[in-house]
Image (spheres, grey):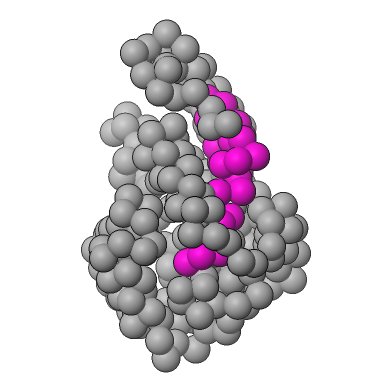
Amino acid sequence: MPWTTEEQQEAQAVYREMALTHFPGDVKLGLNLGFYRTFAVPSIARVLAGTGKLTRQPRIRAKATGELMYTLIEHGLDTGEGEAAVQKLIRLHSGLAVSNEDFVYVLAAFCITPIHWIDTHSWRQTTQAEKSATHTFYSLLAERMGITDVPESFEEFTTWMDAFEVRIFRSTAEGHSLVTATRSLLSDRMPRLLSPLADGIFTCLLGERLRNTFELPRPGLLVRGLVSAALRGRRFRMRRARTHGPSSRAAAPAA
């Protein structure tokens, strides 16, 4: 889909504001959850586990990936910093036994998972402008990386992603090894008091489709109730802070 230079810049600005100002914690968590979804794709899990980098040094690898993504978000795709980050992504992924469809799915996971998390658990839902800007950002990234056949709207991308997961998600030894190696990236952020429940909370955050794919035990009723109550309380506190706090004006929804 062709975009004018002005449309590209506007979309990146809307996505940047959403990710860095309106929903900073939600987007970061959503990107992490999106990354976990890629472990359920056998071909992607095979490549990620095969390099050994993510299983041996999960924190270092996750930090490096996050820094690249946030360089693109903060600086834009067409600045010097952004272009360098895109070229590094291309080098890192060149020669890997991953199909174009798999690369489209990775972009879908990063594009759609944070939006779904925000719409379900954050202080307000995203606007249509924010959804469209997010889709445009990842479509532009796809163009620059030579990835083709990205669906042409956020809604079409969401439908495509769901159908892909139903068709492709499978339990594999590689996927299990990646989940085991990286689960501490989320569980270590939990308060020490909740450490005995960390595995169950982690599984709740992954959601039912990933839990079933990875064949993880369903968390008990106590843990599910605790997570649900904590997320509702978090949403209430965030809404109250946005409504009554000094940042309420800056946090108004994008038009």
- Is 4 situated left or right of 16 in this image? right
Nearest to the observer: residue 232 or residue 16: 16
| Looking at the image, residue 142 lies above or below residue 71 | below
Q: Residue at x 52, y 84 (%)?
A: 98
Q: Does any portion of residue 112 appear in the rendered image?
A: yes
Relative side of 247 to 47, left or right: left
Q: Quadrant of the C terminus?
A: top right
Q: Quadrant of residue 13?
A: top left
Vertical order, 125 against 44 (above or below): above
Horizontally, is 68 left or right of 154 in the view?
left
Majority SS type along the magenta span: helix
- Percent from the top left, x then y, of residue 21? 38, 34
Q: Is residue 82 above or below residue 252?
A: below
Q: Residue furthest top?
A: 244
What are the residue bounds of the magenta stretch?
116-141
Quarter placement of the N terminus: bottom right
- Residue 124: in magenta span: yes
Left or right of 113 in this view: 26:
left
Q: Is residue 29 visible?
A: no
Question: What residue do we see at 49% from left, 17% from top?
Answer: 239
Count of residue discs = 0
Q: Residue at x 44, y 70 (%)?
A: 177
Q: Residue at x 31, y 32 (%)?
A: 191
Q: Position of residue 132 (x, y in %)?
A: 61, 48
Q: Position of residue 166 (x, y in %)?
A: 74, 65
Q: Position of residue 62 (x, y in %)?
A: 32, 61
Query: Is-magenta flag for residue 209?
Result: no
